[in-house]
Amino acid sequence: MSLEFIIFFSILSFLTSLLTSVFSVGGGLIMLVALAQYFSPSTLIPLHGAIQLSNNLSRTYVYKEFFKWQLIKNILIATIFGAFCAILLFGSVSEKVLIWLIAGTILFFTWVPLDNFVLSIIKNDWFCGFISGFAGVFIGANGPLVTSYMRTRDLSPKVLVANHGAVMIFQHSLKIILFMYFFKFSLLDYLSFIIILAINGFAGALLGKKLIGYISFEKFNVVLKLLLTLLALILLF
């Protein structure tokens, strides 16, 4: 890896961590798109997972007082089933089809009122955990799915950011382990690169926590919905 390559991704790690520390979404997908220009899918997805794992560790630590185990435990259990299904099917389902499904789900959670019985079947922790665990292994774009679902729980910005980060830690860790076992991904080959990005990501998380206090819940929710919509459209086009 060239020095220019490392500097570029170090800056990107800081900025994406800052973005996600404020809105709990956006940074991971931006990093995924950037890494996709240089790595094949079997390396891209676990490497992206490792980078995002370090950034989410920083973010969850910074917001640790807002962590709520009861809020996420069912999501984590369902993630295991989704991730295992995905790793067994990896490469056999069209990436384009999956991307359309993910983008559609993000837009659905973001804009459709989830207040009747039928929709409540979809609006639950188990569905969120399974589909995001599956998507995380298949194309790496699981963060917006979890955020779009958790946004419907009327959480404060800090609680949303903290617990979204905790879900991401689990999902990225599981994804890395699965790719190491099934596809012989070598984490050690990229360890120094990941550590450098983790340091910059921690700095971004610290700055993000300072900025989030200046944003009202109403404005936070409006910006989050617009950002989720933009990220869904980026996936589609």
Image (cartoon, helix red, strand yellow):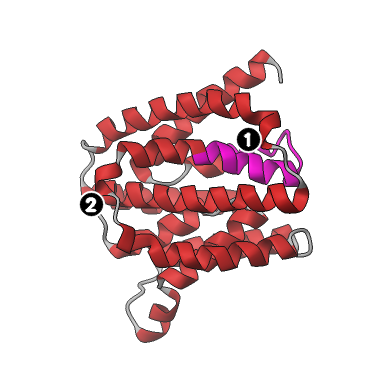
Q: Is residue 46 magenta?
A: yes
Q: Secondary structure at mark 1?
A: helix
Number of marks in picture: 2
Magenta residues?
Answer: 31-53
Q: Could you tell me if the residues under marks 2 and 1 are in contact, i.e. CB atoms within 8 Å?
A: no
Q: Which residue is mark 2?
A: 218
Residue 33's place in the image compared with 145, above or below, is above
The x and y percentages for residue 28 are: 52, 42
Label placed on residue 128: none
Image point (23%, 51%), residue name: 218
C-alpha separation, residue under disc 2 versus residue under disc 1 = 31 Å
* Residue 148 belongs to magenta span: no
Q: Amino acid at mark 1?
A: Ala
- Against 79, residue 189 (above or below) is above
Count residues near mark 1 (Cα–Cα under 10 Å), then give few for <14, some for 14-19, many for 20+: some
Quarter residue 113 falls in:
bottom left
Relative to 193, say whether 183 is above or below. below
Which one is in front in this view, the residue at disc 2 or the one at disc 1?
A: 1
Counting from the top left corner in percent of width and height, residue 176 is at 62, 47
Q: Which residue is mark 1?
A: 34
